[in-house]
Image: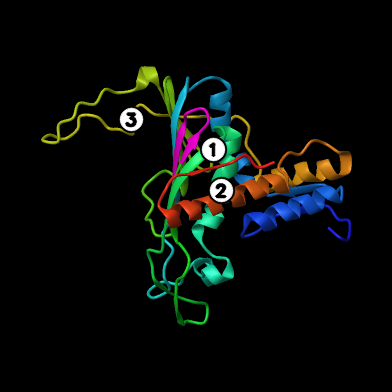
């Protein structure tokens, strides 16, 4: 910023809200163009969700269920596939500060304004093996469970975990349920079930279900193959810098992600719902 350079960085832009806001203010006061990576907005699966919303497929959206994560080996029998600092709070690790920043911009840009939340973080795996083959104590949360209430009455619940074995369509899935239809989007694909194709289950645990619940879902076509999500946003920022084209994913949007993570930690520590005040 002191050098007068445009700023574009990954999230989280800081590990605390005060620092995140101070970075945004410093860049803004200096008149510098700035941006933060919010790559998931350009994933093919989420672009298909956006299309469904724009065309009124869902009717009134009721709820969103997000499942994210996979099993990260602890290094005892299989080499770990994530770095050890991810599980050390003192080194900036923790899944809540990582993933709540993502969920903030996904919810803000697709589903609505978050007004309050309830969250819980957990360190399910107390020990792992580091890059030197040494055991170390895990001091950061490796799983986070968050419920977000939106101003438009939509309820979003996101599970994020490095301790979950995947039995779903993708490493990230978002199920959106509405009055007229539902959709399940992964990183690239999206499956839909309109009201007319919705089966009518009858609860009877004494017999095998006559319904295959994966039937009656249709895979959306990929009409326009998407490029790499990081590349798409990076090119938009370059056009913003060179040609002054609009770019709304600024460091302020990055600060909003840090805010959500910080409030999630507050909710976790205090075991209560907390409000999400506007950040401007």
Q: Earlier in the sequence, mark 3 or mark 2?
A: 3
Q: Position of residue 198 (x, y in %)?
A: 34, 22
Res. 249 mark: none
- Look at the image and tell me in which quarter the C terminus lies: top right
Q: Secondary structure at mark 2?
A: helix
Sort mark 1 into few (<14), some (14-19) or many (20+) by Cα contacts within 10 Å: many
Which residue is tagged 2? 260
Q: Spatial distance from mark 3 to mark 1, Cα to Cα? A: 33 Å
Determine if the magenta segment contains residue 152: yes
Sort mark 3 into few (<14), some (14-19) or many (20+) by Cα contacts within 10 Å: few
Which residue is tagged 1? 114
Residue 208 sits in which quadrant?
A: top left
Along the line of sight, which residue is nearer the eye, 247 or 199? 247
Q: Residue furthest left?
A: 206
Q: Spatial distance from mark 3 to mark 2, Cα to Cα? A: 37 Å
- Which segment did they paint magenta? 148-159
Q: Residue at x 53, y 30 (%)?
A: 151
Which residue is tagged 3? 215
Query: Tags 3 and 1 in contact by the CB under 8 Å rule?
Result: no
């Amino acid at each position: 910023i002191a050098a007068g350079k445009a700023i574009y960085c990954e999230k989280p832009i800081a590990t605390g809200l005060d620092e995140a806001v101070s970075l945004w203010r410093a860049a803004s006061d200096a008149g510098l163009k700035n941006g933060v990576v919010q790559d998931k907005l350009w994933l093919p699966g989420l672009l298909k969700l956006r299309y469904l919303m724009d065309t009124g497929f869902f009717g009134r959206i009721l709820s969103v269920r997000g499942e994210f994560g996979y099993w990260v080996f602890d290094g005892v029998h299989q080499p770990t596939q994530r770095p050890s600092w991810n599980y050390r709070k003192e080194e900036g690790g923790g899944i809540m500060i990582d993933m709540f920043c993502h969920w903030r911009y996904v919810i803000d840009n697709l589903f609505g304004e978050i007004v309050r939340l309830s969250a819980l973080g957990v360190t399910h795996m107390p020990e792992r093996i580091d890059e030197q083959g040494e055991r170390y104590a895990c001091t950061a949360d490796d799983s986070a469970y968050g419920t977000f209430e939106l101003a438009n009455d939509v309820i979003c619940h996101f599970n994020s975990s490095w301790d979950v074995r995947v039995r779903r369509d993708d490493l990230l899935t978002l199920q959106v349920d509405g009055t007229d239809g539902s959709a399940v989007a992964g990183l690239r694909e999206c499956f839909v079930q309109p009201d007319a194709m919705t089966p009518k289950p009858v609860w009877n645990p004494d017999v095998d279900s006559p319904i295959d619940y994966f039937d009656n879902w249709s895979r959306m076509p990929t009409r326009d193959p998407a490029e790499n999500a990081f590349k798409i946003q990076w090119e938009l920022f370059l056009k913003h810098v060179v040609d002054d084209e609009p770019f709304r994913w600024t460091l302020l949007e990055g600060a909003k992600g840090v805010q959500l993570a910080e409030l999630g930690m507050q909710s976790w520590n205090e075991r209560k719902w907390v409000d999400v005040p506007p950040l401007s």
